[in-house]
Amino acid sequence: MKGALDLLKPILAGAGSTSEGKVVLGTVEGDVHDIGINLVGMMLEGSGFEVIDLGTDVSPQAFVDAVREHEPQVIGMSALLTTTMPSMGATIEALKEAGLRGDVKVMIGGAPITQDFADKIGADGFAPDASSASRKTKELVGAA
Ligand code: B12
């Protein structure tokens, strides 16, 4: 799968510019699933976003540090385990404590994630798959 993704990446990314905005992506703390968020990242790059990929097992503090360093318009968090979903809420709380919540939109996704959960933790957006993640990011950047 990884090898196929590497081959597909230049095709999906095409000749897209990086003028749409900056997105920080990561799989939350305790979770190493990254196939889905890698697809999301490729779709975003193909739609013209600059993507900063923090990888997997990303702590709330690491998201906060990345927002300070890269000043993205959007962060995208992924969770595939029901046990790691709470880290998404913890990251939103950490952004609030750092005084950064107003500076960045938060989008979440992953197989167990629902719009209802996104509403509960105060995320700005949810998307069920990579192509709708790209549409949702455009919507969030437009609202930023
Ligand atoms: C592949 C896989 C693994 C691989 C991961 C490899 C990798 N590099 O990612 C390995 C073998 C490492 C693994 C390990 C484990 N896994 Co696993 N894994 C899977 C599996 C089979 C597929 C996940 C996947 O890649 N799907 C394909 C991608 C394309 O889909 P996706 O991730 O959902 O992503 C799409 C959308 O959700 C969305 N999306 C995803 N992220 C984001 C982010 C944003 C911002 C947005 C907007 C959208 C978005 O867009 C994507 C593209 O369309 C699932 C079962 C399943 N059918 O889902 C179990 C599954 C997720 N794993 C599970 C479990 C239990 C584990 C382990 C705990 C097993 C163990 N006992 O060790 C460990 C946990 C390791 C850890 N700490 O994270 C359970 C979770 C159960 C639960 N309810 O919590 C599942 C559901 C299997 C099961 N039925 O029991 N796993």
Image (cartoon, rainbow, N blue to C red):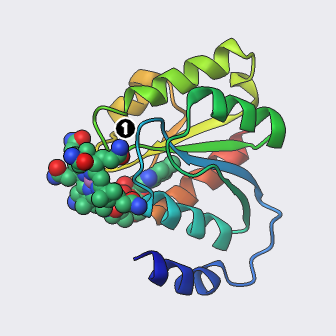
If the picture is divided into quarters, which one holds ligand 1? bottom left
> Residue at horizontal 47%, vertical 30%?
88
> Residue at horizontal 42%, vertical 32%?
118
Residue of label 1: 115
In the image, residue 65 above or below residue 35: above
In the image, residue 76 above or below residue 14: above
Beta carbon of the mark 1 residue lies under 8 A of ligand 1: no
> Residue at horizontal 47%, vertical 35%?
29
Q: Is residue 129 visible?
A: no
Question: Which quarter of the figure is the C terminus placed in?
Answer: top right
Q: Residue 6 appears at what percent x and percent y?
A: 55, 80
Horizontal side, residue 61 vs residue 131: left or right: right
Q: Residue 76 appears at what percent x and percent y?
A: 57, 45
Q: Residue 14 appears at what percent x and percent y?
A: 68, 84
In the image, residue 1 above or below residue 136: below
Q: Quadrant of residue 45?
A: bottom right
Question: Extreme top residue here?
Answer: 97
Secondary element under disc 1, as helix, strand or loop, is helix
Amino acid type of the residue tagged 1 in the rendering: Gln
Is 139 in front, or is 57? 57
Question: Which quarter of the figure is the N terminus placed in?
Answer: bottom left
